[in-house]
Amino acid sequence: MNGCTYNRTMTPLDFVVSLALISVAAGVLGSLIGLGGGVVIVPVLTLLYRVDIRLAIGASIVSVIATSSGAAAAYVRERMTNLRAGMFLEIATTTGAVSGAYLTTILPTRFLFVFFGIVLGYSSFATFRRRHADAPLTVSKDRIANYFNLHGSYYDQAEQREIPYKVVGTTPGLGLMYVAGLVSALLGIGSGALKVPAMDSAMHLPMKVSSATSNFMIGVTAAASAGVYFIRGQIDPIIAAPVAAGVLVGATFGARVLGRVTSKTVRLVFVVVLVVISLEMLQKGIFP
Amino acid sequence: MTEMHKATSVAQDSGSDEPDPALASLGGSGRRRQLSPEEAMRMAEKVRKVELAISLVLRIGVVMSVLVIATGLALMFAHHSAYVPLRGSFSYKELTSKATPFPHSFASLGHAISQGKGQGIVVLGVLILILTPVLRVAVSVLAFVYEKDPPMAIVTLYVLAVLVGSFFLAGV
């Protein structure tokens, strides 16, 4: 509390410039591992700048859409995104996001934070365990995946070859995506945190494709709840402006990195960030 | 240009004995047979065009929103001399508290923009950003119609309906 008196006043210009720089970093990280950058933005705004949590969540939604659109523009062009699988799974995420917006008042938030803290803790472990078994599938008996032809192929710059892959587990995938949409609407964070493990572990998409496809999808999930945030007055222009601009710049840079690094690196960075999010959620549930 | 060339040259190579991995998975929903090399090449071109169109939509949305947001931010600082100094007594907290007024409905947004307020312009840029994924989904519906893939077009149309519905449910 006393700390404030030692510091000189931070003017709006200081605020905008410093927040824009932090947002660039959030954009690079978010675009690389398929998360929205809310992991960085929400704690920075609440803990460092002491901004109200409601405004911080509004800024987080803006950062998710910025990461998604900024990075997806490049990933789609480079054929890293699985467009068909992404759009198919958006059925579940958007439905989840809309139902989540109406469950906010019914469900106890603290319990949800603890529950998803544990879920994400487990999925970080599951994602880590798959670090050696990364070979893509060559056959699929999944009827939904075969009917909609959700299988794909991408060019891996790090391995310098075309990697075809088959998709399985669309039913558990859809279920997890519904939950992912629900969580992002209820808690304001974690939109990509469940999508990447759903595609990587349940549906066996290659790690880089999971990240790029999650990136592609999170913008749509976030847009489904953005209208509510706008009307509730959670999108403050002086916060949203540096976040949007910084994240867009960062995501454009980050999108150049994903092709070059190995799947294993992407996986390990993702696991570390997932552990952080899971701890963040547990903390919010246990010591709010 | 070069990428388009890559995609089509990949398609032409597939005439040889080894089927190209990039083409093995091409095709729409419900297809039961292998595509002939010519069909596969035409499909590859269509898929490529769709990818480039979606990428372009995202890029235009992103560039437009950044330009509008930057203009709005510049206006905010131009109109309020107290915001500008690096050392001053005016704290950013006055702009980020619960009581800070800013537009959060279309009526107040229109009012702020017509008065040339920076805040209004920034919010307009953020709305362009929010609408970019929605526009991307709308373009995807057309793309699947173009690829002659009705099941995927219906899937995407459902997503678009939920998105548009969510804005109405929010009372925008």
Image: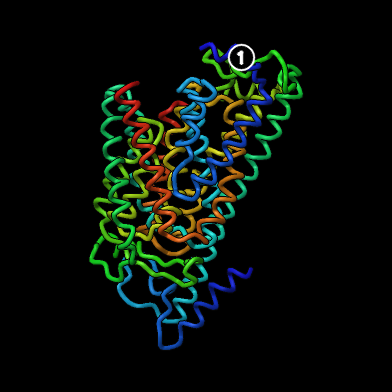
Give coordinates of residue A121: x percent, y percent.
29, 41
- Left or right: where B17 falls relative to A143: right
Q: Quadrant of the C terminus of chain A?
A: top left
- Asked if residue A269 is positioned above or below residue A245 in the image, the reply reads below
- Mark 1: which amino acid? Tyr
Local SS, label 1? helix
Give coordinates of residue A196: x percent, y percent.
37, 49
Give coordinates of residue A272: x percent, y percent.
39, 45
Give me the residue at 24% from left, 62% from top. A142
- Asked if residue A154 is positioned above or below residue A12 in the image, the reply reads below
Question: Across the whole image, how many numbered discs are drawn on residues?
Answer: 1
- Asked if residue A5 is positioned above or below residue B10 in the image, the reply reads above
Give me the residue at 58% from left, 70% from top. B4
Query: Label 1 crowding class (10 Å Cα cut-off): few <14, some 14-19, many 20+?
Result: few
Give coordinates of residue B117: x percent, y percent.
69, 23
Give me the residue at 49% from left, 66% from top. A158
Q: Is residue B94 visible?
A: yes
- Left or right: where A244 falls relative to A288: right
Q: Is residue A231 visible?
A: no
- Chain of residue at mark 1: A
Work out whether residue A16 or residue A108 is closer to the camera in this orientation and state it: A16
Work out whether residue B165 or residue A195 is closer to the camera in this orientation and state it: A195
Work out whether residue A173 or residue A258 is closer to the camera in this orientation and state it: A258
Colour basis: rainbow
Give me the residue at 42% from left, 59% from top. A263
- Left or right: where A167 falls relative to A272: left
Q: Which residue is mark 1?
A: A6
